[in-house]
Amino acid sequence: MHIPDGYLSPGTCAVFYGVMAPVWYLASKKMEKAFALKGLPLMALGAAFTFVIQMFNFPIPGGSSGHMVGGAVLGIVLGPWAGIIAMSLTLALQALLFGDGGLLSFGANCFNMALLMPVAAYFIFRVFTAGEPGRVRGFLGAAAAAYVAVNLAALAAGIELGIQPLIAHTMDGRALYAPYPLHIALPAMVLPHLVFFGVVEALATALVVSYVLKMGLSVEAGQKTSYRPLLVFIAALIVLVPLGLIATGTPWGEWGKEELGQLLGFVPSGIERFEGAWKGILPDYGQSEGATALLYVVSALIGSALVVAAVYVWSRLWKK
Amino acid sequence: MEKMTLPDWMKGPAPNGCPSVDGQKARGFIEKSLKNFASVLKKAFTADYAARDGAMQRLEPRAKLAGFFFLLLAAALSESWVFIFSLFVLTFGLSIITKVGAATLLKRALPAVVFTAVLTIPAIFSFVTPGSPLVDIGGLTITDEGLKTALFFVLRVSMMAALASLAVLTTRQADFFRGLGRLLPGFFVTALFFTFKFVLILVKTAIDAALARKSRTIDGQGVKEAQRWFASRVAFILKKSLNMAEEVSMAMVSRGFEGKVRFNPAGPLGRGEYLWLGAASFFLFLSFGY
C-alpha cells in the first residue's frame, strides 16, 4: 500500500501534505498534553514497534503467509493521536532510509495509513466494545476495526491512483503518472484487501489486541475516551450532504438501465431482471417533485440515526 | 619450514552472503520473517558507500538533502522525455563520481522498477489505453499511446527511486538525521532518529524470538498454534517497547531533557554546496517549462 514516488502528480502530493500538516500539528500538541516528556520515546517506540511487526509474517491456512500494516493495532492500543504520529514516523523511516514508499507521496501515504487507519480502527473498536465487553466482543471488535480500517486505506489509495489519468495528462490525453483510471485502479486496490489482506489484518490485529488486553498493556486504556471528534466528523458529513445536489449527472455506479446500456453497449441480464425490484423505504431519498436540500438532510439524519440505534441495540444485546 | 597460505575461499569477499537474505528461497512464515529482518539490517548498515571519498559524500548534509529534494521535484514535475532522460544521465554520472557505482544504484532501485514495470504491462494494451495500434499479440493490441505512457511512467519512477537511493547511500546515518534536523522540525527528526535506533533493538528481539521458535520446531505445527505464537510475540514486543519508552523517558529527564530538541548550529556552506544547490535548482526551474 506504500505509494512510491512518480505514481502521484506533484499537485496531489501537495494536497495531501496540506491535509496532513494540521493533523500532525494537532496530534503532536495532543501528545504533548497527554504524555508530556514521555511522549517522544513513546511515539518513537510505537513507530519502531509497527516497523517490526510489519516484517513479521502472519501464518494463514494453506501454508501461505502475509504481513500486517499495523495501523489498526496502533490506533487501538495507543489511541488515535499517538497512532497518527507513530505511524507517520514509521512511514517516514521506511521512505527515507529503506526506499519503501516515496518522499513526495509521503503525505498521501500518511493520509491512508497513518490517519485513516488508526482513527477508523480506534472509533470502530470503541463502538464495538462499548460497555463492558467480554473477550469475544473484544476480539470481534478488533477484527472488525482492522478489517474496515485497512479497506478504507486501500479505498483511499485506489482513489488517489485512479484519479491521476483524469487530473494529470498530456495534451493528447496520455497519463503522466499512475496510468490506470478509477474503474481499474479502485477494484485492483480494494478487491485484494477485501478478500485477502483485510482478513490477514483483521485476524492478526484481533489476536494481538486480545493478548494486549489480557496483559493490560494498552496505553490508551487509562485515558478518557472522547467521542467528540467522531461526532464532529459525522455532523460535518451530514451538513455537507446537500453538496451532492450541486453535482451534475448520475453518481458513479448508480446508473439506470438506459444509461448503462449507453455506457457498456449492453445491459447485463441480472440488472435487466432485478432493477426496480426493491424501491427502499424512502425511494430516491424521499425526493418527489420539488425535492429540497432539507429533504436530503432529513434522509441523511434518519439514516445515521438508524445506524446509531442499531449499534446501540447491538451493544446492549451483547451486554446481556 | 613449510609456507602457510590462506585457502582461496577465505580471500574472497564473503562469497555466500547471508543465507537468510541471499540465495535460498524462504519457505515457512518464520523463514520469511527472518529474511525480512535480515534485509532491514542489511539495508540499515550500508555505511561503506557513505564513507568513501566521493564528491557527494563531502557535501554538507543539509545542502545535499535539499539538492536531492529539488531534483526529485524536478523529476516529478517534468512532462518531457528528454528532461527525464537527462536527469537519468546526471544520476548515472553522480553514481560514478560518488564511487557508489551504477550497478549498486540499480540494485537498490530495482525492486521499485521491477514492480512498476510489471504493474504497467496492461497499460500498453488498447483495453486500457486506446490509440493507434502498433502490434497485435493474440487478439490484444499494443497501442502507440499505451507504450509511450507505460515507458514514460516506468522511466520517471525508476529515475526517482534511483535519486532517493543515491541520497541515502552517500549520506552517513548520523549526518542524514543532522541534515534533516536543519530542514524539518527538531521534534520530528529526533523522534525519527529514536525510531531508527529502536527499530534495530526491536529487530534483534524479533530475530531472537523467531530463531528460538525455529530451533525448537522439529515438525510443522498447526496454523492456529503458529498464529497464537505470532500474537504472543507481537504483544511481547509491544510490552518491551512500552517498558523501554518508560526507561528512556526517565533517563532523558534525569539527564536534563526539558522537551526541547536543539541541534548544533550549522556550519557555513562552501563552494561545492552552492554549486550543487545551484545545479539542482537549475534543473528544478527547467522542469517547470519541460
Image: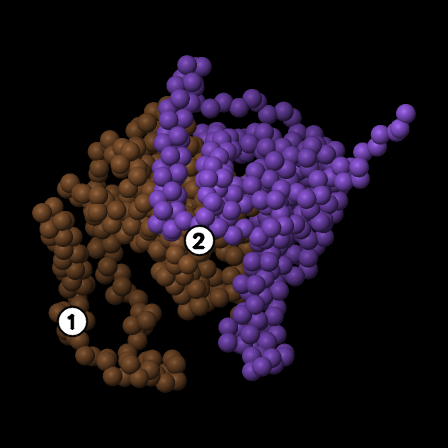
Q: Can residue A253 be seen in this view?
A: yes
Q: Residue at x 43, y 64 (%)?
A: A188
Instruction: Look at the image and name its color scheme.
Output: by chain
What residue would you read off at disc 1? A280
Q: Rate crowding at label 2 as few (under 14), some (14 to 19) or many (20 or more) other CA atoms within 10 Å.
A: some
Classify B264 as above or below B53.
Answer: above
The residue type indicated by label 2 comes to Ser
Q: Chain A is drawn in which colour?
A: brown
Q: Rate crowding at label 1 as few (under 14), some (14 to 19) or many (20 or more) other CA atoms within 10 Å.
A: few
Q: Is residue A140 left or right of residue A102?
A: left
Classify B98 as above or below A278.
Answer: above
Q: Which chain carries label 2?
A: A
Q: How far apart are marks 2 and 1 (CA)?
A: 42 Å
Q: Residue at x 33, y 84 (%)?
A: A267
Chain that is coloured purple in the picture: B
Front-lying residue, A223 or A23: A223
Instruction: Identify the element where label 1 is drawn.
Output: loop
Q: Earlier in the sequence, mark 2 or mark 1?
A: 2
Residue furthest left as drawn: A320
What residue would you read off at disc 2? A65
Where does residue B100 sit, x and y in percent of width and height? Answer: 71, 42
Q: Which residue is drawn at 36% across and 61% down?
A: A195
Classify A180 as above or below A29.
Answer: below
